[in-house]
Amino acid sequence: MEGRQSLLSGVGLFGSVPAALLPWLLTTRIAPIYESAGAPLPELTRFWMDWWPVSLLLPLLVGVIWWRLEAYPRRGTVTAMASAIGAMLVDGFSVIALWLPLLRLPDLAV
């Protein structure tokens, strides 16, 4: 059981880093493509482009959870779950925020 919890801790800690960096990739690479097409960005997309650095707190939060639960026997499970839930929230919001401009592209073709 100890080895499994250590593995889950590692997955949770290291898995939260790419999850937190995906919004940066989407806003620096994909959003400029929308703007170059002349598509006006929705407010939600503009908001996320301005506030995506908040997602960088995810690995820090997962690390704090891991550190605070040092004596808890299921520390790895809690860490991995916090990382997975955080990744779904951050990356899900990123995908939604950057999908919205695609819905407006047909309006530009008219």
Image (tube, helix red, strand yellow):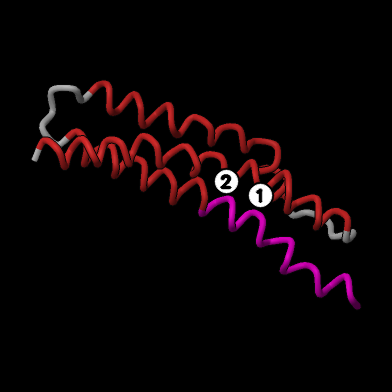
Residue reaching furthest to the front: 3
Indicate left or right for 100 with 104 as reference.
left
The numbered dot on residue 22 is: 2
Identified at 91% across, 78% down, the residue is 110
Which image quadrant for residue 82?
Answer: top left
Depicted 29 relative to depicted 9: above or below? below
The residues tagged by marks 2 and 1 sit, at their Cα atoms, a distance apart of: 6 Å
Tell me whether circle 2 and circle 1 mark residues in contact (CB < 8 Å): yes
Identified at 64% across, 36% down, the residue is 51
Which residues fall within the magenta stretch? 92-110
Dominant secondary structure of the residues highlighted in magenta in the image: helix
The numbered dot on residue 26 is: 1
Depicted 88 relative to depicted 70: above or below? below
Q: Secondary structure at mark 2?
A: helix
Indicate left or right for 99 with 20 as reference.
right
Indicate left or right for 101 with 78 as reference.
right
Image quadrant containing the N terminus? top left
Which residue type does callout 2 highlight?
A: Leu
User: Residue 55 location, x and y as percent?
Assistant: 53, 36
The numbered dot on residue 88 is: none
Number of on-image labels: 2
Which residue type does callout 1 highlight?
A: Leu
Identified at 57% across, 46% down, the residue is 22
